[in-house]
Amino acid sequence: MQNTAYPTFTSEFEKDVYQGLTDFPKHLSSKYFYDKKGDKLFQDIMAMSEYYLTDCEFSILENHKDEISRLFSEDGTPFNLIELGAGDGKKTKILLKHLSDNAIDFKYLPIDISQNALSQLDASIKKELPKIDIKTMQGTYFETLERIHELNGTKKVILFLGSNIGNLLHPQAIDFLQSVQQLMHQDDLLFMGFDQKKNPQTILDAYNDTSGITEAFNKNVLARINTELEGDFNLNDFLHWEVYDPETGTAKSYLVSKKEQLVNIKKIALKVHFKAWETIHTEISQKYDDDVVAWLAKKSGLKIKTEFSDTQQQYKNYVFKKA
């Protein structure tokens, strides 16, 4: 049996793990994939041949960097380039270098949940692009929205790359976009990546590679529980499983218990019973088309200013303004 009395939590991680593993069905947030090991695994995923998203967005930024830079700086005023979920900034550096080389006046404010990723990004920017004024900001997307609000005196260009919006179901995505929209002025821009619907097998392969990198990334949430919360998950007793619904455009990741088992998480005084083949839902990766993106924008008080695509139309970056 699972505990019924709630312990005192000392972190959001403890609280979310307790709630997620006592709910039915069980779930854990994908934001907890990321620690030093998880950051490295995600960099490995982005380098995989199956993970087409990275190459598609790279090509968009490289092929359209001049047009994008002109769009960001078209009114000639200085701006804050705010990136949500910046990670290692590898793609963003294409734009950063172009903006810097053209002496465009801006400040780069990367935001990420992982302080490790931010520290590495800060060091690499100062080494590779020393002319750029950078200030890192640690926190979740939602935690940082109020910090963005404090920057309203300067034009904002908000980047949300990598189709990270796809980690939110449509109602959550609308709430998120509305929150961003409410903190935008009329001249602010929101530049956001949306992975497009395509051959379902291509999508499944991107999240279930044969080399097992995505599996290790998915299981890293269990590894973190073991390390940080004194859990005794045996990672080999869980199966990484990916499904994709081409009708809704929703890909889902699960961890599936291979047998009946009891897991003890000492730091939060929780014993978790798993039936054989019981699931832990860990992530969604939503895919889109133009109609869905236009609908999300309308519901959120935004309008599409323009869009950029790779040559095969597999991925798009949309630019939004306040409606």
Image (cartoon, grey):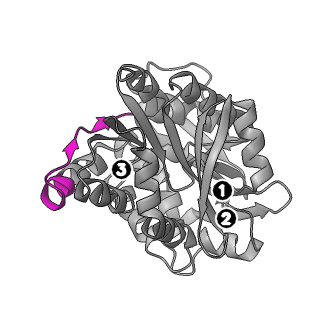
Q: Are marks 1 and 2 in contact (CB under 8 Å)?
A: yes
- Residue 23 in which image quadrant: top right
**Residue pushed farthest front?**
75
Q: Is residue 125 magenta?
A: yes
Q: Nearer the viewer, residue 70 or 16?
A: 70
Of marks 1 and 3, which one's residue comes earlier in the chain? 3
- Amino acid type at image mark 3: Asp
| Residue 84 as seen in the image, left or right of residue 317 | left
Q: What residue sits right under mark 3 in the picture?
A: 35
- Amino acid type at image mark 1: Tyr
State the quadrant of the N terminus: top right
Q: Label 1 to label 3, Cα distance in Å?
A: 19 Å
Q: Residue 261, position in %: x, y?
A: 62, 52
Residue at 40% x, 53% y: name it: 69
Q: Dot 1: few (<14), some (14–19), or many (≥20) neighbours within 10 Å?
A: many
Find numbered disc 2 in the image and state the secondary structure of the residue it sits on.
strand
Q: Dot 3: few (<14), some (14–19), or many (≥20) neighbours within 10 Å?
A: some
Magenta region: which residues? 123-139
Q: What residue sits right under mark 2 in the picture?
A: 241
